[in-house]
Image: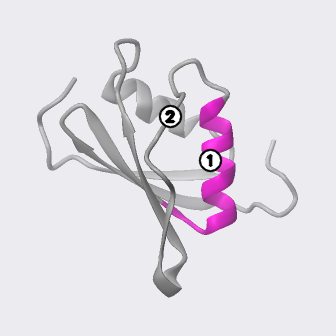
Amino acid sequence: MLPANIADFRVSIKHEGYSCRVKAEGVANSLWLLKCLSHSFAFKTSEPLVANGPTEYCTFQLAYGSHLTRRGLESLLLSVPGVRLSVDRGSKTGR
């Protein structure tokens, strides 16, 4: 369930080999997303969250583990309440 201060928000991911770059709309939304992901067995750590200028998009990188595939990560993100996901399918490397 979404907290009262969180509305639907855009999240885009770009696969980069055995990790992906995540871009989320809004600082509060990004923190919510990280909190949701941290409750998953598949996610335990990421690069620091970086806020990108006045657009208030935040980016971070997630590494795939032996138990998480690209499709698995996409499914996990889609299961997070409020996430509207887009995927950059430009990279064909990784799992």
Foreground mark, 2 or 1, reads 2
Is 6 on the left or on the right of 12, as rendered?
right
Category of crowding for the residue at label 2, using alpha-carbon neighbours closer than 10 angstroms: few (below 14), some (14–19), many (at least 20): few
Is 70 on the left or on the right of 43, as rendered?
left
Whether residue 65 is situated above or below residue 81 in the rendered picture: above
Whether residue 17 is situated above or below residue 61 in the rendered picture: above
In the current view of this chain or complex, which residue is farthest to the top?
Answer: 67
Magenta highlight: main SS = helix
Corner quadrant of residue 31: bottom right
Corner quadrant of residue 41: top right
In the current view of this chain or complex, which residue is farthest to the front?
Answer: 48
Using the image, tell me which numbered label, if any, was put on residue 33: 1
Whether residue 91 is situated above or below residue 69 in the rendered picture: below
Q: Quadrant of the N terminus?
A: top right
Measured as percent of width and height from the top left, residue 87 is found at: 33, 49
Looking at the rendering, the stretch of residues picked out in magenta corresponds to 24-38
Foreground pick, 72 / 40: 40
Measured as percent of width and height from the top left, residue 61 is found at: 38, 47
Using the image, tell me which numbered label, if any, was put on residue 45: 2
In the current view of this chain or complex, which residue is farthest to the left?
Answer: 92
